[in-house]
Amino acid sequence: MEKTTLFDKIWDAHVVKSVPSGPDVFFIDKHFIHEVTSPVAFLNLEKRGIGVKNPSRTVATPDHNVPTVDQDKTIKDKLSRMQVERLRENCARYGIELHDLGSAHHGIVHVIGPELGITQPGMTIVCGDSHTSTHGAFGAIAFGIGTSEVEMVLATQCIMQSKAKKMRITIDGVAGKGVTSKDLILYVIAQISAAGATGYFVEYGGSAIQSLSMEARMTVCNMSIEMGARGGLIAPDETTFEYLKGKEYAPKGEAWDKAVAYWKTLKTDEDAVFDKEYHFDAADIEPMITYGTNPGMGIKIIGNIPTTEGMEGSNKTSYLKSLAYMGFEPGEAIMGKKVDFVFVGSCTNGRIEDIRSVAEFVKGHKKAENITAWIVPGSREVEKMAHEEGLVKILEEAGFELRQPGCSACLAMNDDKIPSGKYAVSTSNRNFEGRQGPGARTMLASPLTVAAVAIAGEICDPREVFEN
């Protein structure tokens, strides 16, 4: 019997029809939608006189464009307001579940799916958003799609998709002090580059991955897309089952037992072959930070920005252009660089575990005067827990501002923008030119590093700032 990977098992079980020398007709279990990539899809359905094939398999929430202050008031930005209004109208028209602004389960789409138990092992999940790969942490095939594909899934509950190649990334060993899942994935991306997994679906394994919490696993899978991968996934285990048990949309009673029995089969066979493999030792990984304009431009926070030695032609030109945008020089140390903003949030690091870690480390400290510090919970549930656990009080005493749920300063599609020329250390996922605002300079790091930078006012090693 052929040995197969976890990816194969889920993929093959969802192929409705294979097109010779072409893509598969691929069934989608869950479809998440938001206000940005869905309006045109719904408009095209209306023009063609087509309904939504299976409304119960689609879940909606506004997140990208929503303000993170005064969410109970009318959205000021006209385009954002129109997009949110269209989402409401379309969900009402087609009977789609909507977690709207102000509702108990509103939040970033990739945060509320897992916390509600909608995301489950063995599923196929899509959304008109590249970071749909987050859901792969549960042992699901999850990936982002474009607007025309959003329309296709709404109309047919299927998508035309070619099967990706398979990559396995194994991280064994024990991570050192101050090293988080964000550091693990930033390290991997720095090692293989921002295009190193292009064309692949990545399975993460090894003892360092298995020891991670579900929230930490979501951070790893979330950033799979930042090394060019189609998506990433981690085999479900007891950590997964414990996280899901009792959640609102998780199976109950006998259905739970039956589901878990199936979920336990979702693992790569021992001798299964991958198209490409990488192995890393967690002991080699230290707190990381990016210095350039793609997530692959990362270094250990105690390291120096690479020089141009060995670079030629367009590679050297683009590298120097990136550093010029950031205001950095080849070969210089990153430590000690002054920072203006810190941002904790996004679908990468906006969960309660992230906010707990920041609150724990800044307790009793005050942010530096030159720092503007934003904390943005990934959902209303995270916000509620932060209040109940006293985290908000700790953060506010330290000078942090807690805002309302949304994508916020991850991307410049709402009011939370970093001003031009200013430096931001961010827990989000992308550091492209203008990603956090026109001219904004973004450095990606873990919540612990962000907490340390907020207190110091400059790039610093979190292991030193919080050694006591």
Image (cartoon, grey):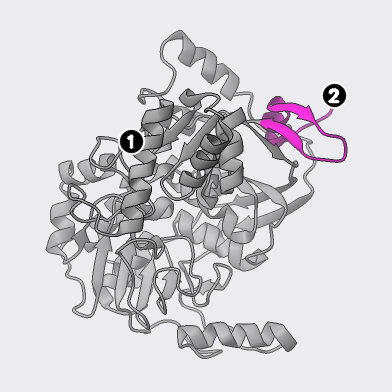
Report the magenta residues as a range: 1-26
Outermost residue, top side: 254
Q: Quadrant of the N terminus?
A: top right
Query: Which residue is located at x 51 percent, y 79 percent?
Result: 303
- Asked if disc 2 and disc 1 are in contact, CB closer than 8 Å, the reply is no
The residue under label 1 is 99
Q: What is the C-alpha distance between the residues marked 2 and 1?
A: 45 Å
- 380 to the left or right of 245: left
- The one nearer the camera, 423 or 298, is 423
Secondary structure under badge 1? loop
Between label 2 and label 1, give the one nearer the viewer: 1
Q: Position of residue 430 (x, y in %)?
A: 49, 64
- Return the disc, 2 or 1, that comes first in the chain's sequence: 2
Secondary structure under badge 2? loop
- 341 to the left or right of 392: right
Residue 399 sits in which quadrant? bottom left
Residue 124 visible at all: no
Query: Is residue 20 rendered magenta in the image?
Result: yes
- 358 to the left or right of 305: left
Position above or below: 332 against 466: below
Residue 162 sits in which quadrant? top right
- The one nearer the camera, 389 or 360, is 389
Query: Which residue is located at x 41 percent, y 25 percent?
Result: 95
Query: Is residue 252 rendered magenta in the image?
Result: no
Q: Position of residue 374 (x, y in %)?
A: 26, 63
The residue under label 2 is 1
Amino acid on which disc 1 is placed:
His
Q: Position of residue 265 (x, y in %)?
A: 64, 24
- The one nearer the camera, 109 or 338, is 109
Query: Which residue is located at x 56 percent, y 73 percent?
Result: 297
Quick one: label 1, few (<14), some, or many (20+) residues within 10 Å?
A: some
Q: Quadrant of the C terminus?
A: bottom left
